[in-house]
Amino acid sequence: MNPTNPSRTLALAALCLFAGTASAHTGDHTTTGFAGGLAHPLLGLDHLLAMIAVGLWAAQQGGRVLWAVPAAFVAAMGLGGLLAWSGGVLPHVETALALSVLALGLLIATQRRWAVAAGMAIAAAFALVHGYAHGLEMPLAASPARYAMGFMLATVCLHGVGIAGRLIGRRAMQAAGAGIAVGGLALVLGV
């Protein structure tokens, strides 16, 4: 595989540009429990892009960040779900979700590096909002533990997709980050 192949880079960037409004929070619950939790991050563009972006950003930095940042994201996302289930309130959740996509895309596009602890804190802050949104969308009949296991497993897999971005090369990762940022901007603007 040639990581500098311009057609692959353009194709990857183009795929990242197909952003619409956040669709994970429609209120339509057709599955419950583990399956519902597993599906939730895959059905919303905001979650999908953010979780892949976390993996890309971690892969771009390498070293301890490669696993520490995704682990912090998954842990904080679980806490966000717990916050929602316990009746806690986070304001402007949809806006925060969209802004997280934009910010993560920009971090990748600009190859912004942070110390491990700072990167973990950034990822955790974004994850708290994503987990809260997951928790709000949990069907009433679902087991919170099973639902959480589902959305956490889906998140780990999406982080893995982002981490696999190491195979596409540095420039393609930057292009993907730019595409994710554009997607985040579209989400912010409601386009």
Image (cartoon, helix red, strand yellow):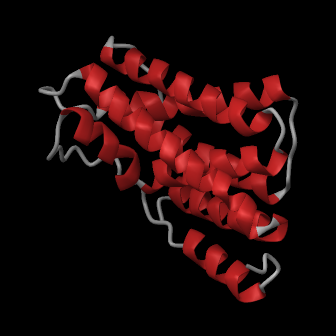
Q: Position of residue 69 (x, y in %)?
A: 69, 33
Identified at 42% across, 43% down, the residue is 154
**x then y, percent, for residue 20:** 45, 65
> Left or right: where does residue 13 sit relative to residue 61?
left
Q: Can you say whether 129 is above or below 11 in the image?
A: above
The tally of labels here is: 0
Q: Residue furthest front?
A: 1
In the image, residue 57 sits, relative to residue 145, either above or below, namely: below
Image point (85%, 53%), residue name: 111
Q: Nearer the viewer, residue 125 or 57?
A: 57
- In the rendered image, residue 176, in percent from the top left (x then y), is placed at 69, 66
Residue 76 shows up from this direction:
yes
- Place residue 99 in its image quadrant: top right
Q: Is residue 125 visible?
A: no
Q: Which quadrant is the N terminus positioned in?
A: bottom right
Image vertical order of residue 58 relative to residue 56, above or below: above
> Where on the picture, by quarter, is residue 115?
top right
77 or 71: nearer the eye? 71
Residue found 83% across the figure and 69% down from its top: 171
Task: Identify the residue at the far bottom of this view.
Answer: 7
Please provide percent x and percent y for residue 60.
Answer: 80, 51
State whether residue 94 is above or below residue 110: above
Relative placement, left or right, of 148 versus 102 is left
Q: Which residue occupies 25% across, 34% down?
A: 34
Q: Is residue 82 left or right of residue 144?
A: right
